[in-house]
Amino acid sequence: MIIMRLLRKIRRWLRRERLTYTPQKVTPEAMARIIDTREPHGLFYRKEARRLYTGVDNTSGDSWTEAFRSRRQCLRWLRCPGLEPEDCGALG
């Protein structure tokens, strides 16, 4: 019971934290810098090829990176905390 309450609090906190960030489109150079330095914190995406988008969740400074078939799938993953990349159509 205590663990369930703690998990709910953590999920609420993560949702609140993620909502303070808006996904930003970045250049290839900026994306590489964000992944390498893990700064600045936030949500980022870029178009790689005709049907390939890369999203980076750097809200916690860990630079979680996933590839998607569409911009919509990428932005859905970035905006929905706790959603598994595979549920959004991640290629990985």
Image (cartoon, grey):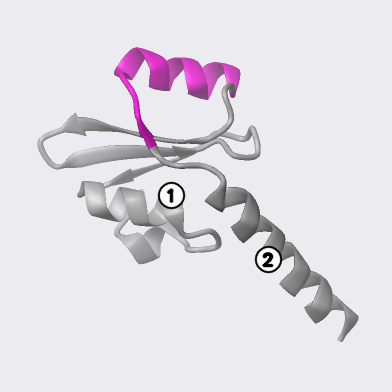
The furthest residue to the left: 50
Residue 44 showing in the rendered view:
yes
The furthest residue to the front: 20
Find residue 56 and report its image quarter. Answer: top left
> Is residue 81 placed above or below 60 in the rendered structure?
below
> Is residue 5 placed above or below 40 in the rendered structure?
below
Q: Residue at x 48, y 63 (%)?
A: 83
Give residue 78's mark. 1
Give residue 12's mark. 2
Q: SS of the residue at dot 1?
A: helix
- Relative to residue 41, is residue 84 drawn left or right? left
- Relative to residue 13, is residue 58 drawn left or right? left
Q: Residue at x 71, y 59 (%)?
A: 13
Quick one: label 2 or label 1, which is nearer the N terminus? 2
Q: Which contiguous range is marked in magenta?
A: 24-38
Which amino acid type corresponds to the residue marked 2 in the rendered image?
Arg
Q: SS of the residue at dot 2?
A: helix
- Residue in the foreground of this view, choosing between 91 and 2: 2
* Residue 27, magenta (yes or no): yes
Which amino acid type corresponds to the residue marked 1 in the rendered image?
Leu
Residue 91 showing in the rendered view:
no
Q: Residue at x 43, y 49 (%)?
A: 78
Q: Position of residue 27 (x, y in %)?
A: 31, 19
Find residue 82 and report its image quarter. Answer: bottom right
The rendered magenta stretch, by its main secondary structure, is classed as: helix
Q: Residue at x 44, y 42 (%)?
A: 22
